[in-house]
Image (spheres, rainbow, N blue to C red):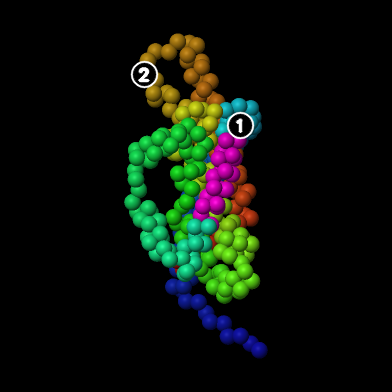
Amino acid sequence: MERNHIGRSRGDVIFDGIILVVLTVIFLLVAYPLYFVIISSFSDPIAVAGGKVVLAPIGFTLDGYKEVFGTNTVMRSFANSLLYTFVGVCINLMVTLPTSYALSRPDFVLRKPVLVFYLITMFIGGGMIPTYLVVRDTGLLNTMWALVIPGALGTFNMIVARTFYTTNIPLELMEAAKLDGCGNTRFFFNIVLPLSGAITAIMVLYYGVGHWNSYFSALIYISDRDKWPLQMELRNILLLNAINAQVNRVLTAEQLREKERLEALAEMMKYSLIIISSIPVLVIYPFVQKHFVKGVMIGSIKG
């Protein structure tokens, strides 16, 4: 049986060509900065600073990575970030999942008032100074808990999880469990959680990326460098590049040599550290990508 092929008009071809060109330009604008960071991490810092690195590494070297892995402060901050992310995600899950499940139950009397209370926090915040005073007065200042407890529950994440429970955990399942003598707590831990692998993966990704990339909270609450997360150490290294603009006095020869050494060290390390700090997220994301898309669709369509 022959198929009738409908010919494409000249306007359709022109339109498709324009779309292809626009998408190609957008792709290059997004991809090239990432590519530049990668090739710069393997290039000579002088060539990078001179603007000679454009399409390929110049003066291929691994000195930047050697400096990163050989610097105690960087490796300590990397370990701190791993610890803060792990502990923070565990606390987030322990708070978000039970709260979301409780707010998804129609038999919870205070469901609407509590939900409104949480929604208000999405639009009205206490401010940085009141939050700092609370953290200080509760004894959390300069501790790991100042980075993980204040943000233990994200309202948007809670709404996404609540929508998942509402649409994927039928009421009939709870009624059947009650007939067998199962209470709410046991039903949540023995039945709901095993059926919530997708939303749990979404919460791990959302909260994990947030903790891993966070530096502002550490900038405010952490004064001891031994407790800095990796992003704070990266920020400190990047700021070393601005030394020239900050120095307005005459330097001795020894001070000048030390200044040049720090600038070269920062130039070598900054791109390498950016790559290293991105690896955990790049490794985790492929495993939760399908759950990530599902979670976004749940929150956008059925929320």
Res 205 label: none
x and y percent of residue 89 in the render? Answer: 55, 48
x and y percent of residue 12 in the render? Answer: 46, 73
Cα separation between marks 2 and 1: 33 Å
Badge 2 local density, few (<14 within 10 Å), some, or many (20+)?
few
Q: Residue at x 52, y 50 (%)?
A: 92
Extreme right residue here? Answer: 1
| Residue 126 versus residue 79 in the image, above or below | below
> Does the magenta run of residues contain 185?
no
Q: Secondary structure at mark 1?
A: helix
Badge 1 local density, few (<14 within 10 Å), some, or many (20+)?
some
Q: Residue at x 42, y 23 (%)?
A: 244
Residue 279 image-quadrant placement: top right
Q: Which residues are magenta?
A: 79-97
Q: Which of these two is toward me, 24 or 273? A: 273
| Residue 145 versus residue 4 in the image, above or below | above
| Residue 244 versus residue 170 in the image, above or below | above
List the residue tagged with mark 2.
248
List the residue tagged with mark 1.
75
Point out the image quarter for the N terminus.
Answer: bottom right
Q: Secondary structure at mark 2?
A: loop
Q: Residue at x 52, y 36 (%)?
A: 144
Kind of residue at badge 2:
Asn
Q: Which of these two is toward me, 50 or 89? A: 89
Q: CB under 8 Å between callouts 2 and 1?
A: no
| Residue 172 versus residue 232 in the image, above or below | below
Q: Is residue 118 visible?
A: yes
Q: Residue at x 62, y 50 (%)?
A: 284
Kind of residue at badge 1:
Met
Residue 144 left/right relative to 112? right
x and y percent of residue 3 in the render? Answer: 61, 85
